[in-house]
Image: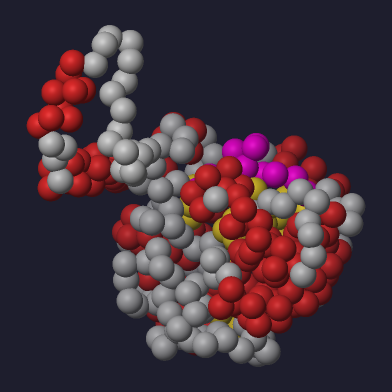
Amino acid sequence: MHPIYPCSLVYLDPAGASSPNSRSKSPLGYVWQALCLNKSLLRAGMPRLNVFTNAADRVAELLAHAPASARPDVHALAATSIDLPKSTPFYAAHFKLDLLSQVSKRLPEDALLMLLDTDMVAMHALDAQVIRRCAALGVGAFDISDQEFPAYGSARVIADLEIVAGRRLVNPRWYGGEFLLATPAFLDALVARGKEYFDRYVAEMPRLNHVGDEAFMSAALNALADEGQPILDVGAYQTVGRHWSGNTHRNLSWYKHCAFVHLPGNKPLVEREAQFAEFDPVRFWRAVSVAHKVGLIRCVVKSLVPRLLHPRPASLERQAAEAPRGHQSQEPSGSAKRL
């Protein structure tokens, strides 16, 4: 079996823009998330998490209250050459490129780096077949095109990828930044291409609809795939699922059976779970289920408010009531369709 090296980035810069998905203005929440992620990894029988950070002493100090057996290993992130305005959305996530560059040089050839976002948990161990396939192919990544294309329009997403890549792509896909399982040899190629595309990404940022590490890393993965690099879609194996409370993209039970669940819109759930001595998947999933039900109710209320504030004229209501059975009444000419 190939050894796994789990790692996460915790980049602390109070002046940097927080994630648009984070309700907290404090970057310290990422430390508590990393603690929870580590506890979940250990409970699932996986190796201890390695946290790479630009503030190693501060992170170690914050984790000192936890038992040594529950703490992740903390490493200093090497000095970076990345230069971005601190107001850039997902500012901290851009430094994952530095993490990949640093870690790829220290791993044994037969090892696999497992890059994880901190706002996720391990529900159970990785499937051995997924590990073997990623080792054989060189990489497993999380293809979320089925979420991004419908949400933003495939033309817009593909345009961003091709702007950053500086070329037409054969089969453009969008990859989530929360998970990567790769060999050191593949990481060398990915980092080299990622650095090349990062410069273009920064130069073209005003033209892009999507800003964040996923833009230039997805472009790099697509270009390598076009050149013959096979990429295992780990999402198809339920290795990881990205869940938004109230979203009906997939049934909630599907996520329960994923090895990792990513909760970008529910970071407080992960932070609260970190306060317990051990990670309990049953307790955690109960909290996820409750948050999902609340999210569903919120979505229903949100869809009803415009109708209550702007009800249809009575004449249109009568037309709808009098429409022949088996036919739907037409929307008023020029009105927006309700999706």
Count of all numbered marks drawn on residues in the image = 0
Which picture quadrant has residue 312?
top left
> Viewed as shown, does residue 265 lie left or right of 306?
right
Give the position of the C terminus as an image quadrant: top left
Which picture quadrant has residue 107?
bottom right
Between 308 and 102, the one lying in front of the other is 308
Up the image or down, 291 lies above or below 55; here it is: above
Q: Residue furthest left?
A: 314
Q: Residue at x 81, y 74 (%)?
A: 192
Q: Residue at x 31, y 28 (%)?
A: 330
Could one spot residue 47 in this view of the protein? no
Q: Residue at x 41, y 68 (%)?
A: 20
Report x, y in % for residue 161: 68, 62
Q: Which residues are magenta?
A: 231-242
Which picture quadrant has residue 110?
bottom right
Report x, y in % for residue 251: 44, 32
Between 6 and 17, the one lying in front of the other is 17
Up the image or down, 1 lies above or below 216; here it is: above
Q: Residue furthest right?
A: 228
Between 20 and 158, the one lying in front of the other is 158
Could one spot residue 156 in this view of the protein? yes
